[in-house]
Image (tube, coloured by chain):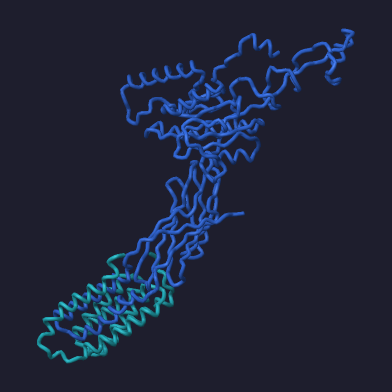
Chain colours: A blue, B cyan
């Protein structure tokens, strides 16, 4: 069902152009009558004064509502979508004039303007985000003597990012015991060959390797490597960034997060999202499927109410299932976000932080020395985070995310555990 | 604000404007007639430019002054001026507006017809006008 959003416009009333014209004429005529002694002009002024006085008997100023259908629209970047906005006053004897505006970056075109009160617009934006459709309302009320102006957010258009379709690699880690698409070293149901061993009672007959059994004279079975699924939770850094390169880099925070989610859901993994540091920190539990993709997009842009809110600065435990892989997108300039990463690492998750900041976050050109000191400091920070167990990879704008994610260090498990696993 | 008035309303308002100029210029001659012609031209221009309506009314005042029109014709002209301005700015006249205009016309006509023989009237008139102006515009201050 398409929901209609209704917003009351807060109107500011002031004398209308009609009032100003009548007052001007009456004042001029009265002045001439007084100065020149033309008393018949009093008769000329009287009807004009009567019009002004009639404001006391006119109907009260009405309340005006702006309706939008649909009240919130979702689309992808550069996709065109349509919505209707109309303004309704409580009483019918007032003239309502409606104008629609959109933020910079959104193209707004009026199609089929039915009346001054109703507009159908086609909107499109090239960059993801939340775009309110602003309605400017002019109301002439009380017999045309008062003009009310008001501005209200009539509707919201959520533009989702379009990301490249390449799959991103997930860091190698111990995966959950659930069937999936990531090849592991574990023996179990699967297709990849692992080993041949002697038959023990309980083995399925169809796993018996007949050529080997015939050669050896006893039953042997083929063992196979199993494919397992992962839980991927994306952590988004929504903390306010300093103006300049850091703010521009936040565009890639959302793009990267969406690409990771898209890639995880496509390979049958469960995916969830945690957005920290925004005014409304929020999270969505891990789940599978195409529906989840759109739910995650909603949660990232805070559209609708299909996500949970969290008051703190750490990722809530419910949002990160045990054993899940956390991939964080951040400029890594905020200590609280780094603390959230360290906390997740201490809880035993595999944490990878993707640093989206390119170079130094200074707006104006600085000395070359400053840039070099900055890059040194960053590399120290990478090393410190790596020591704690949070791997940091740098994602520059000229590379794709899957290239950047290839650089996640491969922490091989100790040989003893690997032997035990196989 | 866009013009909400329909073409019909605009035609009616122009008719009122022309009647306003005509009733002011009934007894006009010489400079009064010239002013009336200019006022009628401005009324016609007012169909396109809304601010011209105010100028047309002000020109009508000058026609009345130049022609020294009698109170009855002045009152007719004033009533038409009120209707002209209201219809030029809004789509329709509400009944309180009509009542206010007609009622005050009657009162104004009565006031203008009184013989102004009393010596203190010119002394009191500016004060009375000032008080009237304040009282009338008071409801608009708060908004």
Could you tell whether A332 is left or right of A307 in the image?
left
Residue A167, placed above or below residue B48: above
Horizontal placement of A235 versus A375: left or right?
right
From what the image shows, is residue A213 above or below residue B75? above
Residue placed furthest toward the left? B119
Q: Where is residue A52 in the image (x, y as percent from the top left)?
A: 30, 75
| Residue B16 appears left or right of A338 | left
- Quadrant containing the N terminus of chain A in the rendered view: bottom right
Near-viewer residue (B12 or A388): A388
Residue B125 seen in render: yes
Residue A384, image quadrant: top left
Instruction: Name the quadrant containing residue A138.
Output: bottom left
- Looking at the picture, how far across and down is residue A144, in whole percent? 37, 72
- A158 above or below A109? above
Residue A313 in the image: state x and y as whole percent: 46, 32
**Dividing the image into 4 quarters, which one contains the C terminus of chain A?**
top right
Of A67 and A359, which appears nearest the observer? Answer: A67
The residue lying at 46 percent from left, 70 percent from top is: A91
Q: Residue A121's spot in the image, x, y percent?
A: 51, 56
Does A182 sit left or right of B66 as displayed? right
Question: Which residue reaches farthest top?
Answer: A216
Count of marks overlaid on the render = 0
Residue B126 sits in quarter: bottom left
A100 or A46: nearer the viewer: A46
Q: Can residue B21 be seen in this view?
A: no
Q: Which residue is drawn at 44% across and 61% down?
A: A98
Residue depicted at x 59% and y 41%: A294
């Amino acid at each position: 069902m398409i929901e209609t959003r209704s917003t009351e416009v807060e109107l500011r009333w002031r004398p209308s152009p009609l009032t100003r014209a009548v007052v001007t004429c009456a004042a001029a005529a009265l002045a001439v009558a007084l100065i020149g002694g033309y008393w018949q002009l009093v008769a000329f002024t009287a009807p004009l004064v009567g019009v002004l006085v009639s404001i006391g008997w006119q109907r009260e100023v009405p309340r005006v509502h702006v309706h939008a259908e649909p009240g919130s629209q979702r689309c992808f970047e550069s996709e065109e979508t349509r919505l209707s906005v109309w303004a309704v006053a409580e009483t019918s004897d007032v003239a309502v004039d409606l104008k629609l505006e959109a933020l910079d970056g959104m193209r707004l075109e009026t199609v089929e303007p039915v009346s001054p009160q109703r507009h159908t617009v086609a909107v499109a934006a090239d960059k993801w985000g939340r775009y309110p459709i602003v309605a400017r309302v002019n109301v002439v009320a009380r017999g045309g003597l008062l003009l009310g102006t008001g501005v209200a957010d009539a509707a919201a258009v959520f533009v989702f990012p379009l990301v490249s379709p390449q799959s991103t690699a997930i860091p190698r880690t111990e995966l959950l015991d659930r069937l999936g698409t990531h090849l592991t070293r574990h023996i179990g149901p699967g297709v990849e060959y692992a080993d041949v061993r002697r038959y023990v009672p309980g083995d399925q007959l169809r796993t018996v390797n007949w050529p080997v059994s015939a050669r050896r004279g006893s039953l042997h079975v083929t063992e196979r490597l199993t494919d397992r699924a992962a839980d991927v939770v994306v952590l988004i850094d929504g903390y306010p960034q300093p103006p300049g390169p850091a703010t521009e880099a936040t565009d890639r925070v959302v793009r990267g997060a969406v690409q990771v989610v898209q890639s995880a859901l496509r390979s049958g993994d469960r995916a969830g999202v945690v957005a920290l540091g925004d005014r409304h920190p929020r999270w969505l539990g891990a789940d599978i499927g195409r529906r989840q993709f759109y739910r995650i997009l909603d949660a990232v842009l805070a559209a609708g109410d299909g996500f949970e809110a969290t008051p703190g600065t750490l990722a809530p435990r419910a949002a990160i299932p045990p054993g899940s892989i956390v991939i964080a997108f951040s400029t890594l300039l905020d200590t609280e976000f780094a603390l959230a990463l360290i906390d997740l690492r201490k809880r035993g998750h595999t944490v990878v932080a993707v640093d989206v900041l390119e170079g130094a976050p200074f707006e104006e050109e600085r000395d070359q020395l400053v840039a070099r000191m900055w890059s040194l400091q960053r590399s120290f920070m990478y090393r410190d985070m790596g020591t704690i167990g949070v791997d940091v990879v740098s994602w520059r704008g000229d590379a794709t995310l899957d290239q950047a994610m290839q650089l996640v260090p491969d922490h091989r498990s100790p040989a003893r555990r690997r032997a035990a696993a196989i | 604000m866009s013009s909400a008035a329909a073409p019909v309303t605009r035609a009616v308002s122009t008719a009122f404007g022309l009647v306003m100029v005509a009733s002011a210029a009934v007894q006009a001659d010489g400079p009064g007639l010239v002013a009336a012609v200019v006022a009628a031209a401005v009324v016609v221009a007012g169909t396109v430019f809304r601010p011209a309506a105010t100028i047309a009314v002000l020109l009508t005042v000058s026609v009345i002054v130049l022609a020294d029109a009698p109170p009855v014709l002045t009152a007719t002209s004033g009533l038409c001026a009120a209707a002209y301005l209201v219809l030029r700015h809004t789509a329709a006249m509400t009944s309180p507006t009509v009542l206010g205009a007609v009622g005050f016309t009657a009162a104004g006509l009565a006031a203008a017809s009184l013989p102004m023989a009393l010596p203190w009237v010119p002394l009191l008139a500016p004060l009375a006008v000032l008080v009237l102006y304040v009282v009338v515009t008071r409801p608009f201050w708060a908004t």
